[in-house]
Amino acid sequence: MDGLKNTIAKRVEVMKAAAVKRRRWSHSPTHELADQISRAFGEPKRFASYLGLINKIGEVRARSIFGEINESKAKEPRKLFFWKCAEVYKLDHPDEAPKAKRPKKVKPPKQLPLI
């Protein structure tokens, strides 16, 4: 019985530690990944932008891109992550090309009154 009590006690401690480590606002694995990425890149305040990007390309692809960047030891991993995600999104959505800017309206020159 003592062995069982010790096992249960250790298991409870592990579960409590995991509960403390998890954020209160973290609702899904996508939120966890966005938090992990934003903290890894040293930008915890840009959590929302990482979450939006992950929602656009999917959690599996975002996790694989994040893994590639961690292994590559890039100089600027943030920029590389955003660039790779943008490229993946462009491949998946070729019809959604950026809209061309409208040309500015040119005012006609003022005409001098005829006397």
Image: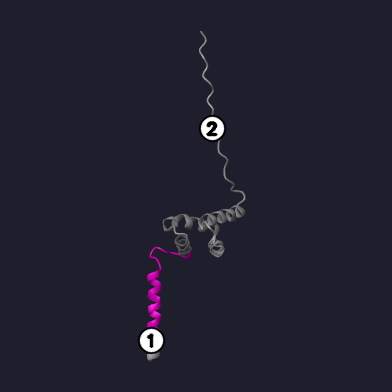
Range shown magenta: 4-29
Quadrant of residue 2 in the image? bottom left
Q: Is residue 108 above or below residue 38?
A: above
Q: Mark 1 = which residue?
A: 6
- Say which residue appears at 52% left-offset and 16% top-offset: 111
- Residue 91, x across and y down, in percent: 62, 54
Q: Amino acid at mark 1?
A: Asn
Q: Earlier in the sequence, mark 1 or mark 2?
A: 1
Q: From this viewpoint, which residue is outermost toward the front?
A: 75
Query: In the rendered image of this protein, does residue 98 appear above or below residue 84?
Result: above
Q: Residue at x 50, y 56 (%)?
A: 78
Q: In the image, which disc is placed on residue 104?
A: 2
For label 2, count other residues whose C-alpha is less than 10 Å away and answer few (under 14), some (14-19) or many (20+).
few
**19 in magenta:** yes
Quadrant housing the N terminus: bottom left
Tell me how many marks there are.
2
**Amino acid type of the residue tagged 2 in the rendering:** Lys
Q: Disc 2 on helix, strand or loop?
A: loop
Image coordinates of residue 48 in percent, x first then y, are 44, 56
Residue 65 occupies quadrant = bottom right
Where does residue 37 sit, x and y in percent of width and height? 48, 61
**Membership of 5 in magenta stretch:** yes
The quarter of the picture where residue 12 lies is: bottom left
